[in-house]
Amino acid sequence: MQLRDIPGLKYIVRNNSYGYLAVVFLLFVLGSAISLLFWHNINIQTEKAQIIKYQQQLNGSKSIIIQSLNQYSLLLDDGTSLLNLTNNNVSQAQWLTFFQSYNLPSNYPGVDAVSFSRYVPAADLSQYLSSMSSQGYPNLSIVPNTPMKAYAPVSLIGYVSPNSMKAMGYNQLSNPMEAAAINEAIKTGSMTMSGKINLFDINDGQPSFIIFKPVFAGPSSTKAERASSIYGFVYVAVTARSFFNGMFGRYLNSNLALRVYDRNMAPSHLIYQSPKYASVIKRMNGPIYSGIHVSFGKYPWYLRIVTNKAVLQSRDGQPSYNVLIIGVALSAVLALLVWYFTYYRERKLYWEKQAEIQAAKDELLSLASHQLRTPATIVKQYLGILLQNYGGTIPKKQQKIIQTAYDSNEHQLEIANQFLNAARLGSGRIVINRQRLSLSDVTEQVVTDHQKLAAKRQQKLVFTQPKRPIYVEADPRYIPMVIENLINNAIKYSKSRSTISVKLKRDAHNAIISVKDQGIGIAEEDLPKIFDKFSRATNVQNMEQIGTGIGLYLVKQVTEMHEGNISVKSQLNKGTEFNVYIPLKKAKP
């Protein structure tokens, strides 16, 4: 049936030469109106999804801050353990040596010092100064020298810079903010964090905060027992600017600005402000203001985050105007148009749900890895303390047992770190910081570190390189991980009395790291998926060797983040060869 045969339209068509065009126009308007209605609905739903996703990202930032503070608090646990094991008899040299192994500037951004302040009643002040004099500080004085009922002078400093030593003898109870945190620590017997302070002659008066952990010399179950047995406080002093830049610096740009307040949003309580905060907001096209609260101790933080709405929309996707144009053009086929929008919306919701599921999986993986890593790290520190004879000389037989436990714990930490790195990759929290480094030295060191393991398995690990060192622009934290994974796999899946060859060479454009073994090989059908997360070759699943299926995934991801690539050749029961290519274009010697 044609349009002119529809009942009710014959009169219009017969008596009005423009009747047919009028009906077509009405259908076109109706189709356009329906198209516009659907487009508008999608626009609203997309904006809601953007807001939900953005809020989830803010909540993720809160988790990152809490996790970082928990990591910093482990320093206090380790310092307290050292004091307990030595019956509170630790010299400045021992304290400094103990914390130098932590590589504080790199692993704990913003840390100015990990120190210990002694709690000294006024009646015991002379005895304290005499004790410090016998330890090599004959001219030590309490600063400021104000009469008080009790003092908390800084007595041990694990410093990051020479300025940290200037705090020796500083009375922390003289500062109201520090005194409040110290008194709270004595009252509760647990860690506390100070509000905004300016550190004493350490970081040029930059806003900072301190986390305290009390150390008791006797019973501490009740408030009265804690007050009478308080011995001192292990504390970590942190510069707020370096702390927040370390976590969020790579995200702060012309489209994102951040302020952090201590307790409330009064100007005097501003503890951190991202660079060029006001000018960044002024240049934004529709700024979105959001806030989250983070509590760790007595003083909560309030984060004021400003995001460029235009960038958020372009990143998450706005319904295209082309969709509206297509809808209008195809208004005559309304059923097809409805199907198109329905399908589009369903696919969008599907990918958003998949992204949420992946984010939840990554968060769960990160949390599980963190929960595994934290006790393993504590065990490592305790075993390390025993092996270094801080708790007294240990017979060789017991040292061997402790060393075996230490090595097993290191393997546990390696697995936890692999899961943690995989979670960070999935959530985009790994950033490559390039610097010029000698790939020759890095590769040689990794090979040297694995010689003992190869010899234990009666394998020969051979390293060859050109006489002239090869330099690249790469991240020194992750390139060694690539080489370690490949050599570990070669050792793990090769038979005894076999040879593993590691070669470093170059071509016109790349530095090439080659790891070749005479092991069990990889089946041809498994080669396309060996770089997938949690994927393992079929023939290794029946072996006794334990694997996570993450190592080669991390190798490929890290290599590609360096703008490189990796190839593999393998034959069953004959061996495997991996070649990693790292560009040379940014690393002229």
Image (cartoon, helix red, strand yellow):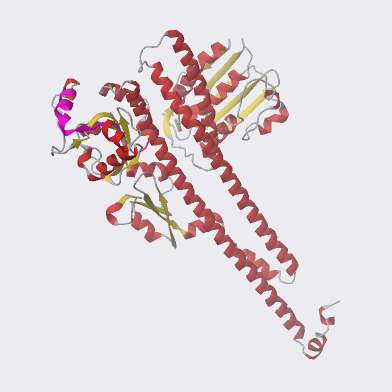
Residue extent of the magenta highlight: 107-131
Taking the spot 22% from the left edge, 39% from the top edge, the residue there is 173
| Residue 240 visible in rendering | yes
Q: Position of residue 197 (x, y in %)?
A: 26, 45
| Residue 161 visible in rendering | no
Q: Position of residue 322 (x, y in %)?
A: 62, 64
Quadrant assignment for the N terminus:
bottom right
Of 257 and 75, which appears nearest the observer?
Answer: 75
Q: Quadrant of residue 68?
A: top left
- Whether 269 is drawn above or below 533: the answer is below
Residue at the extreme bottom: 15
Q: Position of residue 227 (x, y in %)?
A: 27, 35
Q: Is residue 250 magenta?
A: no
Of 234 and 480, which appears nearest the observer?
Answer: 234
Taking the spot 67% from the left edge, 66% from the top edge, the residue there is 326
Residue at the extreme top: 396
